[in-house]
Amino acid sequence: MHQPSTPRSVRALRFGALLLLLLLFSLGASLGLMAYALYADSTQQAFLGLYGMLLSLVLFILYRISSWSAFCPLCRGPVLGGSGAQRNRRSKRSLGSHRLRVARDILLTNSFVCPYCNERTLCKTKERYRTNQP
């Protein structure tokens, strides 16, 4: 299993995964609330849906910033952001999305399988062994 070399990489992976899942949840809830507001003709529900959309926009901006720092330590592929590169043919999806699978695995199992190189990575920094020289 591969491991990132710096704690900053691990924080970026976890924070980006959390933001992606929060973004998808808030966007789904906001769209559902807006649809209900149109159906029930309720302006208060519509404003709540609009605030949810604004929250989704802020979460999207934060997600894009944090996903720039989330890389696979082996192939240096952006696991939470798209690069336009071809993914491995054996990489699996979750609900049709490689990013969603990576985010789910990071938060639930503390490891993920890179969709580009198809290698498992543990979200824990490598231990550095230092030798004491006299």
Image (spheres, rainbow, N blue to C red):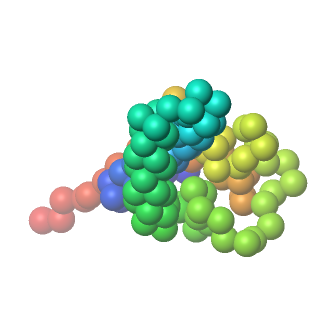
Q: Is residue 18 visible?
A: no
Q: From the top left corner, tell me how far across and down residue 19 is, in percent.
A: 45, 47
**Which quarter of the picture shows residue 103?**
top right
Q: Is residue 97 above or below residue 85?
A: above
- Residue sitting at x 59%, y 27%: 40
Residue 114 placement (x, y as % from top left): 66, 52
Query: Where residue 71 sits in the image (x, y, percent)?
Result: 53, 62
Work out whether residue 50 can be spotted: yes
Q: Residue furthest right?
A: 89
Tell which of 48 and 120 is nearer to you. Answer: 48
Q: What number of labels is visible?
A: 0
Q: Going by the picture, which residue comes out furthest to the front? A: 41
Rendered-image quadrant of the N terminus: top right
**Relative side of 28 to 51, left or right:** right
At x 87%, y 54%, the residue is 89
Going 33% across and 54% down the picture, which residue do you hit? 7
Q: As drawn, which residue projects farthest toward the left?
A: 134
x 71%, y 53%: residue? 115
Quarter of the image containing the C terminus?
Answer: bottom left
Q: Position of residue 116 (x, y in %)?
A: 72, 60
